[in-house]
Image: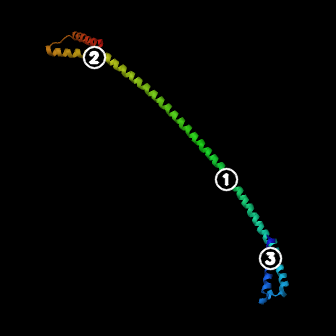
Amino acid sequence: MIKKIFFQSIFLSFLFLMEAFAAESGGMPQLNPEFWISQIFWLTITFGILYVVLSKLILPKISANLETRKSQIVDNIEAAEKQREQSERNIAEYEKIVQNSKVEAKNYFRQAREKLLKDINLKKDALDKELNLEIQKTESEIQELKNKAPEKINKIAAETSADLLHQLIGEEVNNSSISAIVDDLSRKKMDKYYGN
């Protein structure tokens, strides 16, 4: 790059000299051929110093800055790549955790459902057992009442008949005879119902 600048400066100097030949007749003192050698000398000295300053002082700093920037860019790209890989690993771990959580939630739900159904079945069985006991108890009470009912009805009928006869006749009637008649009549009625 420095060589390119140097050759460009020489080329520009050559163009300047060509123009100087063309402009000599205009009376410009810097274009007078007497001063050309000194002008070329100072031009070469100036561009030589400029070349040395550029090549030894300025361009190395620019090159160092470019190298530093290049290494920083490479480091940044490597860091970004590492961050991307870490992010991908984190996303994969997150997805795995979410998947495991879904599976665990399904298992907990299934276990809770099974436990609830088991509890419901146990309570249902206990309730069925209680209801069966209550039904048996009630049926036995009904059967007992049914068994005792004719005797009580006969007793009530005998007492009522004795009271009616006492009111109609005005005399006390033998309770045992009335009870025997009522028992006889009730047996006939019961045989009639049970016979059919």
| Disc assigned to residue 11 | 3
Decide: is 53 above or below 76: below
The type of colouring in the image is: rainbow
Where's residue 109, x and y in %? 53, 38
Decide: is 66 above or below 122: below
Write the residue at 65% across / 50% down.
88
In the image shown, does 185 or 89 lie closer to the viewer?
Answer: 89
How far apart in space, not on screen, are marks 3 and 2 (Cα)? Answer: 148 Å
Which quarter shows the C terminus? top left
How far apart in space, not on screen, are marks 2 and 1 (Cα)? Answer: 98 Å
The answer to whether the residues at label 3 and label 2 have Cβ atoms under 8 Å apart is: no
- Per the image, label 3 sits on a secondary structure element best described as helix
Where's residue 12, x and y in %? 78, 78
In the image shown, does 17 or 39 lie closer to the viewer?
Answer: 17
Which of marks 1 and 3 precedes in the sequence?
A: 3
Left or right, 112 with reference to 136? right
Where's residue 174, x and y in %? 20, 10
| Disc assigned to residue 139 | none
Which mark's residue is nearer the viewer, 3 or 2?
Answer: 3
Where's residue 195, x and y in %? 29, 11
